[in-house]
Amino acid sequence: MSKEFAIGSKVRVVALPAYVKTAEPMPMLRPPNVIQIGEEGIVIDRRPGGYWGIRFARGAFLLDSQYIESADTPPESYLE
């Protein structure tokens, strides 16, 4: 089951995929180093297949829900 996020909510990157896809009308694949683990962004929309459009400082990208968590919760490293 995929995680659900409200449009406009803040999310944090917890893992990087092998590549990231831009959230543009003509999407392009980018290397994962355009975003970093721990970087926060704003959810701009929901896409089919468990993907979320997220606006980061370096642009808007599509990420699967397994790579992000709500920024309202402390990072997992703080919970140990």
Image (cartoon, rainbow, N blue to C red):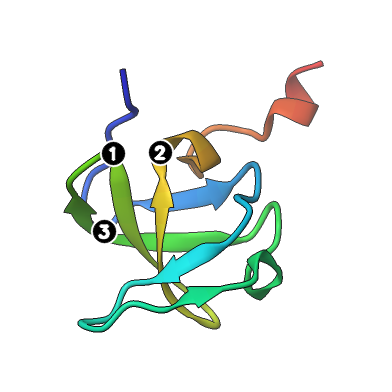
Q: Nearer the viewer, residue 29 or 72?
A: 29
Mark 1 and mark 2 in contact (Cβ < 8 Å)?
yes
Q: Quadrant of the C terminus?
A: top right
Kind of residue at badge 1: Gly
Please tell me which residue is depicted at 41% across the width and 44% down the height of the picture: 64
- List the residue tagged with mark 3: 8
Q: Quadrant of the N terminus?
A: top left
Please tell me which residue is depicted at 55% across the width and 59% down the height of the picture: 40
Label 3: state its secondary structure.
loop
Kind of residue at badge 2: Ser
Which of discs 2 and 3 lies nearer the camera? The answer is 2
Disc on the earlier residue, 1 or 3: 3
Disc on the earlier residue, 2 or 3: 3
Please tell me which residue is depicted at 32% across the width and 73% down the height of the picture: 23
Label 1: state its secondary structure.
loop
- List the residue tagged with mark 1: 50
Q: Dot 1: few (<14), some (14–19), or many (≥20) neighbours within 10 Å?
A: some
Q: Nearer the viewer, residue 65 or 41?
A: 65
Q: Dot 3: few (<14), some (14–19), or many (≥20) neighbours within 10 Å?
A: few
Q: Distance between the Cα atoms at labels 2 and 1?
A: 6 Å
Mark 3 and mark 1 in contact (Cβ < 8 Å)?
no
- List the residue tagged with mark 2: 65
